Image (cartoon, grey):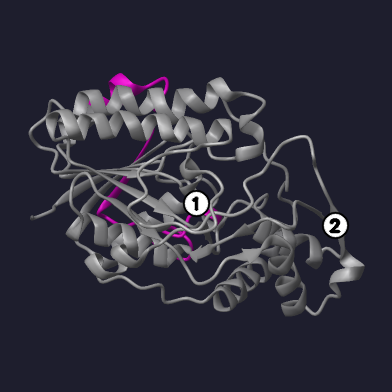
């Protein structure tokens, strides 16, 4: 399948912007980026960080909820071979406060775009960036798990969007592939996320208040994850689910301990363990990526230790900007 042009929805999200960077670096594709927010400062956009804007990339500020007609017109004008959707309301705790907003973006937004794309003959592939949270908390999982058990409004909204796309595939052979990825991290991530916020707080010599430190997560370096998406575009098959995972699961407490060790800071002195019993949290997500690794010939290359070193280096390098950044999630409707 020859690819000349792709559209990336959510192109200035953390994961989306890294994918754009990898696509521009490793292919000759034309890339059209769409996000609801304007392009951020370069320190949060790897495709612009210490780089000139690629002649193969153009960006448009459009919102999947409010501008779906304009986006659909853009699809018909650009006629992309592939659409990759990173757009999502993704911060889990806040989804309990405004669940309707999560469903608007993560489900209804998808319905409006995919319902248009399913009628167009130029589209060869649609890649949906999903989440392992649709499975709920699970310690051991076969890769062919085919049922959902979401336990948060965020996970439920993502599952609903996935089910609609799955129905399109089963009913009319809509060329969708699903990607479910471990927790993606790396340089240029939003400062409120656990890894950059921990590094920033320790560098400021401020205590970290650690909620739910006992939960376990799997972390995958963002360029490894982005290269996985490229593999799905080039080798993936419609209707398939691809799991990308990196190494062993680690508790959030041990993750922060590792960061403290790398920064030469005693954990007991700078971290306050807390708990929040108001909302149940999934204890562990275990993705089995064996089939994905075999079928796509993909392997993670960056270890968690190496990746944390790179995040710490990025924080040091961009300190003048990052020290002024908010470490609190701000919800945008």
Q: Give above or below for 84 relative to 70.
A: below
Judged left or right of residue 83, residue 303 is right
Please give the label number shown on residue 273.
2
The earlier-in-sequence mark between 1 and 2 is 1
How far across and down, in percent of the image, does residue 39 sit?
47, 43
Query: From which residue to which does the magenta span run?
Result: 44-72
Front-lying residue, 50 or 220 = 220
Please give the label number shown on residue 14.
1
Q: Residue at x 40, y 67 (%)?
A: 224
Disc 2 crowd rating (10 Å Cα; few below 14, some 14-19, many 20+) is some
Judged left or right of residue 278, residue 221 is left
How far across and down, in percent of the image, does residue 207 sit?
87, 59
Q: Residue at x 63, y 73 (%)?
A: 313
- Tell me the quarter of the picture where residue 195 sits: bottom right
Would you say residue 116 sits in the magenta stretch?
no
Would you say residue 65 sits in the magenta stretch?
yes
Quarter of the picture containing the C terminus is top right
How far across and down, in percent of the image, does residue 232 sit?
25, 57
Which type of secondary structure does the marked residue at label 1 adopt?
helix
Labels 1 & 2 near each other (Cβ < 8 A)? no
Q: Residue at x 47, y 30 (%)?
A: 157
Q: Residue at x 49, y 31 (%)?
A: 156
- Tell me the quarter of the picture where residue 108 sits: top left
Q: Give above or below for 64 relative to 319.
A: above
Q: Is residue 206 visible?
A: no
Quarter of the picture containing the N terminus is bottom left
């Amino acid at each position: 399948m020859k690819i000349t042009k792709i559209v990336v929805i959510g192109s200035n999200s953390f994961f989306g912007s890294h994918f754009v960077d990898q696509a521009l670096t490793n292919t000759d594709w034309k890339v059209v980026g769409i996000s609801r927010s304007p392009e951020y400062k370069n320190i949060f956009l790897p495709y612009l960080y210490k780089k000139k804007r690629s002649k193969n990339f153009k960006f448009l500020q459009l919102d999947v909820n409010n501008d779906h007609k304009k986006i659909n017109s853009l699809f018909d004008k650009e006629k992309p071979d592939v659409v990759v959707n990173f757009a999502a309301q993704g911060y889990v705790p806040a989804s309990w406060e405004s669940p309707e907003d999560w469903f608007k973006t993560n489900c209804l937004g998808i319905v409006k775009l995919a319902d248009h794309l399913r009628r167009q003959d130029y589209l060869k592939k649609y890649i949906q960036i999903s989440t392992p949270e649709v499975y709920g908390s699970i310690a051991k999982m076969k890769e062919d798990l085919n049922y959902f058990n979401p336990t948060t409004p965020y996970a439920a909204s993502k599952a609903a969007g996935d089910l609609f796309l799955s129905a399109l595939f089963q009913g009319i052979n809509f060329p969708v592939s699903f990607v479910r990825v471990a927790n993606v991290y790396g340089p240029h991530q939003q400062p409120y996320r656990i890894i950059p916020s921990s590094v920033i707080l320790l560098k400021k010599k401020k205590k970290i208040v650690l909620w739910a430190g006992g939960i376990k997560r799997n972390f995958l370096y963002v360029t490894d994850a982005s290269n996985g998406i490229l593999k799905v575009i080039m080798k993936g098959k419609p209707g398939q689910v691809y799991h990308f995972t990196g190494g062993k699961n680690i508790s959030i407490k041990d993750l922060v301990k590792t960061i403290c060790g790398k920064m030469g800071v005693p954990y007991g002195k700078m971290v306050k363990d807390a708990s929040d019993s108001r909302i149940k949290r999934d204890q562990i997500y275990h993705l089995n990526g064996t089939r994905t690794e075999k079928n796509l010939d993909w392997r993670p290359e960056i270890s968690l230790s190496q990746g944390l070193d790179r995040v710490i280096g990025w924080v040091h390098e961009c300190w003048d900007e990052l020290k002024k950044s908010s470490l609190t999630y701000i919800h945008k409707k």
